[in-house]
Image (cartoon, helix red, strand yellow):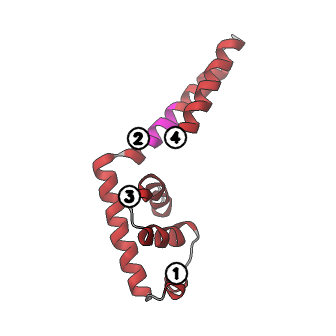
Amino acid sequence: MAKELKFVMLLDCYGDLLTRHQRNIMELYYCDDLSLAEIGQPMGITRQAVRCTIKRTEELLLNYEEKLRFAEKLVQLRSCFGSISKIAENINDADLKNALEKKVSEGLKLL
């Protein structure tokens, strides 16, 4: 998984555990693709302060994932639902097929 995508996913999973400042900087950097200067200038902090916040927060997010494995489990669940959906395509019983597809859709919405 690409580093940027990994941190976007970790931010999605664990973002509520961060301070507002940490989350804001991470979202601006990873989701909005702003440079360190573009993030720091309106906040009144240096590029170095932004970089330090990003590095510390990356470590924090990786630590959460190492202990909780929530993001890894989400990836596995999405894969599992995808497999069930592919299997459902081959079912001839329309009622059963629709019921399975409905449950897969409901499960994916929960993720």
Of circles 1 and 3, which is in front?
3
Picture residue at 59% right of the left edge, 25% below the top: 103
- At label 4, the amino acid type is Leu
Q: Which residue is under mark 1? A: 39
Residue 50, visible in the rendered structure: yes
Picture residue at 36% right of the left edge, 73% below the top: 55
Picture residue at 28% right of the left edge, 49% below the top: 67
Q: CA distance from mark 1 to mark 4?
A: 30 Å
Q: Classify residue 97 as left or right of residue 22.
A: right
- At label 1, the amino acid type is Ile
Q: Which residue is under mark 2? A: 73
Q: Give the secondary structure at mark 3.
A: helix
Picture residue at 29% right of the left edge, 58% below the top: 63
Mark 1, Cα crowd under 10 Å, few <14 / some 14-19 / many 20+, is: many
- At label 3, the amino acid type is Leu
First in sequence: mark 1 vs mark 3: 3
Numbered tag placed on residue 17 in the rendering = 3
Q: CA distance from mark 3 to mark 4?
A: 18 Å
First in sequence: mark 1 vs mark 4: 1
Mark 3, Cα crowd under 10 Å, few <14 / some 14-19 / many 20+, is: few
Q: Which residue is under mark 4? A: 111
Q: Position of residue 60 (x, y in %)?
A: 32, 63
Of circles 3 and 2, which is in front?
3
Of circles 2 and 1, which is in front?
1
Q: Position of residue 102 (x, y in %)?
A: 64, 25
